[in-house]
Amino acid sequence: METVYLETTFISYLVALPARDLVVAAHQQITRDWWQQRRQHFRCVVSPVVIDEVSSGDESEIKKRLEIVGPLDVLAASTDAEELTQAIMDSGVLPEKAVRDAAHIAVAAVHGVEYLLTWNCRHLANAQISPRVQVVCKRQGFRMPVICTPEELLEEDADE
């Protein structure tokens, strides 16, 4: 069974109240569709970085997010993941403020995760950034997971 790393934006979109912004509302619905239709086809995992991120903010939202991540496997942070995070940051591909985004990639890569599911298209699911991060991962001896949105990981219905 393939493994999917659920990045924080996925968890947040899954439990958030419907947004007024039509694009965000559509992303939320796609996230819920993926969760209902596709999650059983994958081993879903998170990391301590995700746990930390979903544990901040509004108390009622924290509770909803922790209910989602609670039953999931938590991938251990390791020296290899810390070193890969640092290599990604040292490469200059991501700005300093995106160190947690580098950590998401690093933990997933070190653990051999196939997919990293996110709505963060600024630093993660970004067609210009991903290939450059992939080079860093390969140089460090790891295969970067496919970084994609839930929409990209929805399976087409055979009846369509």
Image (cartoon, rainbow, N blue to C red):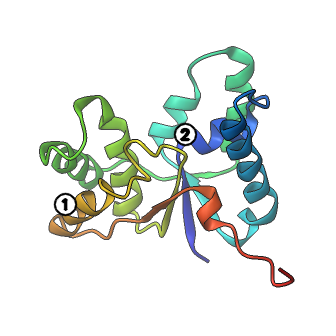
Residue at image mark 1:
136
Q: Amino acid at mark 2?
A: Thr
User: Looking at the image, which is closer to me, 97 or 21?
Assistant: 21
* Tag 2 and tag 1, C-beta contact below 8 Å: no
Horizontal arrangement in the rendering, residue 50 relative to residue 23 (left or right): left
Report if residue 54 is visible in the image: yes
Q: Is residue 141 above or below residue 32?
A: below
Q: Quadrant of the N terminus?
A: bottom right
Q: Looking at the picture, how far across and down is residue 88, in whole percent? A: 21, 49
Identify the residue shown where x is 73% and y is 26%: 63
Q: Which mark is residue 42?
A: none
Q: Secondary structure at mark 1?
A: helix
Identify the residue shown where x is 54% and y is 36%: 51
Q: Is residue 38 above or below residue 26?
A: below
The quarter of the displayed image where residue 43 is located:
bottom right
Crowd rating for badge 1 (residues with CA inside 10 Å; few <14, some 14–19, many 20+) = many
Q: Looking at the picture, how far across and down is residue 41, in whole percent? A: 71, 72
The quarter of the displayed image where residue 24 is located:
top right
Q: Looking at the picture, how far across and down is residue 8, in whole percent? A: 55, 40
User: Looking at the image, which is closer to me, 19 or 140?
Assistant: 19
Horizontal arrangement in the rendering, residue 10 relative to residue 49 (left or right): right
Horizontal arrangement in the rendering, residue 48 relative to residue 92 (left or right): right
The quarter of the displayed image where residue 27 is located:
top right
Q: Reading the chain from its start, which is encountered first: label 2 or label 1?
A: 2
Q: Secondary structure at mark 2?
A: helix
Q: Quadrant of the C terminus?
A: bottom right
Q: Which mark is residue 8?
A: 2
Q: Amino acid at mark 1?
A: Val
Identify the residue shown where x is 70% and y is 48%: 71
Give the number of marks: 2
- Of all residues shown, which one is farthest toward the right? 159
User: Looking at the image, which is closer to me, 89 or 48?
Assistant: 89
